[in-house]
Amino acid sequence: MNQQADEISLDPADWEELRSELHRAADMMTDYLRDVRHRGVWKPLPAETRARLATPAPEQGIGLQGALSDFQRDILPYPTGNIHPRFWSWVTGCGTATGLVSELLAAGMNNLSIGLDDSSPVQVELQVLNWFKDLFGFPRDASGLLVSGGSMANMVGIVVGRTARAGYDVRAEGLNPHGQPRLMVYASAETHSSVEKSVEVLGFGRPSLRLIPVTAGFEIDVPKLKKQIQADVDAGHRPCILIGNAGTVNTGACDPLDELADIAAAHGMWFHVDGAFGAMAALTNLQIPNLRGLKRADSLAFDLHKWLYQQYSAGCVLVKNSTAHHASFEVNPIYLDLLGSGLAAGPVNFNALGVQLSRSFMALRLWLSFKTHGVEKFRRLIAQNIHQARYLHDAVDASKSLENLTQVALNIVCYRCNPGGLSESELEDLNRRLLITLQERGIAAPSSTRIHGRFAIRVAIVNHRSRREDFEMLVRESESIGKELVRQRQRVG
Ligand SMILES: *Cc1c(COP(=O)(O)O)cnc(C)c1O
């Protein structure tokens, strides 16, 4: 078949050139991953790089080779740093080396993963969802969906809870139609902001969200929760959704999920669990008591790109009652009809289970990763991260100038430098500068939070590359930079 002279496409004129550029890119990224430990964790972008990254779109291309060289010069040296073994900011996964391969394969197939089609990627997603159901103790007839991340997974769970437990037809009537009670959502004050965002976006209205105070261990205060529910019932509102945390973002605290499941059941509420990263602790043999009720969740949200170490971005939501899941999102546009056989035979319509229609072939990452390494490897890695957090906590305890600001619930340590004789505001200033110095010198990248109002250096470990020596280095450097900053102050003061 011949191409007309005026017909163009984005395919290469010379496939051998593509092959060699692909090999060059593969070599570049293999070296990049292999040598990550020998680079700094992070460095700021130089001004000329910033300027080049702010130029307008080129009308004429420079070819793949040229574009790759620009990538190598302006982009590759200045990442967030989260693939580094000493990156512990926020809750940030580091990806895997096999992920390089699955991204290449997925890009080659470029599947749209809407589920209407009788194709292997649909079966792979269904298989991966079944693996998760088995791992988290959900029944095989539960439904599920891969989504962009924990935020979207939480939203899907909250939508299903709203539809299933409103007591009227929310989809037909909208929220809080006249004469109906206000629908209430309960979660602890330590709950991730994505829940607040969902509640607002879904139109509950901010007064529908009750953020319940927490205990000294940052778990939801159950007596206060019960009291609030009763007060709301007395006021004529309807308790609709209860959200439990398996691992809060600040400190990794886990709410007592078994107890919450009982409370939800007693009030006819939907029980959603945000297990963005913490759900993974249930895959270990560590028997975290508060996670025992995880499998009692009506819906469970978790990320693949955090504590399952997968490449960005992917999260998952499991919903025990598949009918309720479908009833919340199902729409049947004529152009998405299932035809029973042929291409659109469709074992499932993923669009009827969430917000997104087209999605990338996220399932392949996890599929290739579990096939390559086996689940047992992941169980051990997750446990390793928990042991590392305990190790770091003990090392901080043993230090003369550092102190812990929390206990370790899972994989997060919050500490600060406190050499003695400084006021709270001086300590805040010292620890801010200590954290920024750790980052700017490329030593390590913890992030910050506040524990009871105190500025804390926060280390969240969802990193399969971290080693014990990395935490020893963090303690050593925190002590010595702390000392250095105090000396500087004294000289200035
Ligand atoms: C990260 C996180 C989220 C949001 O997940 P994304 O993947 O970033 O959208 C929700 N809840 C908790 C507890 C988290 O740590």
Image (cartoon, rainbow, N blue to C red):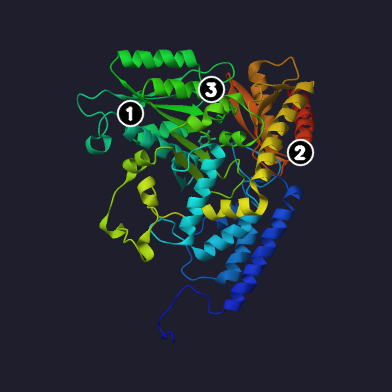
> What's the distance in space between the residues labelled 1 and 2, CA to CA?
45 Å
> What's the distance in space between the residues labelled 3 and 1, CA to CA?
27 Å
Instruction: From the viewer's perspective, tell me whether residue 184 is left or right of residue 51.
Output: left
Report which quarter residue 487 is drawn in: top right
Dot 2: what SS? helix
Ligand 1 within 8 angstroms of badge 2 C-beta: no
Dot 3: what SS? loop
Q: Are marks 1 and 2 in contact (CB under 8 Å)?
A: no
User: Mark 1 = which residue?
Assistant: 205
| Front label number (3 vs 1) | 3
> What's the distance in space between the residues labelled 3 and 2, CA to CA?
32 Å
Residue 374 seen in this snapshot: yes
Could you tell me which residue is drawn at 64 percent across and 39 percent down?
Answer: 462
- In this view, the residue in front, 354 or 260, is 260
Q: Which mark is residue 256?
A: 3
Q: Name the quarter where the N terminus is drawn.
A: bottom left
Decide: few, some or many residues near mark 1? Use Cα within 10 Å; few <14, some 14-19, many ≥20. some
Q: Amino acid at mark 3?
A: Pro
Between discs 3 and 1, the one toward the N terminus:
1
Q: Are marks 3 and 2 in contact (CB under 8 Å)?
A: no
Dot 1: what SS? loop
Instruction: From the viewer's perspective, tell me whether residue 11 is left or right of residue 267.
Output: right
User: Mark 2 = which residue?
Assistant: 470
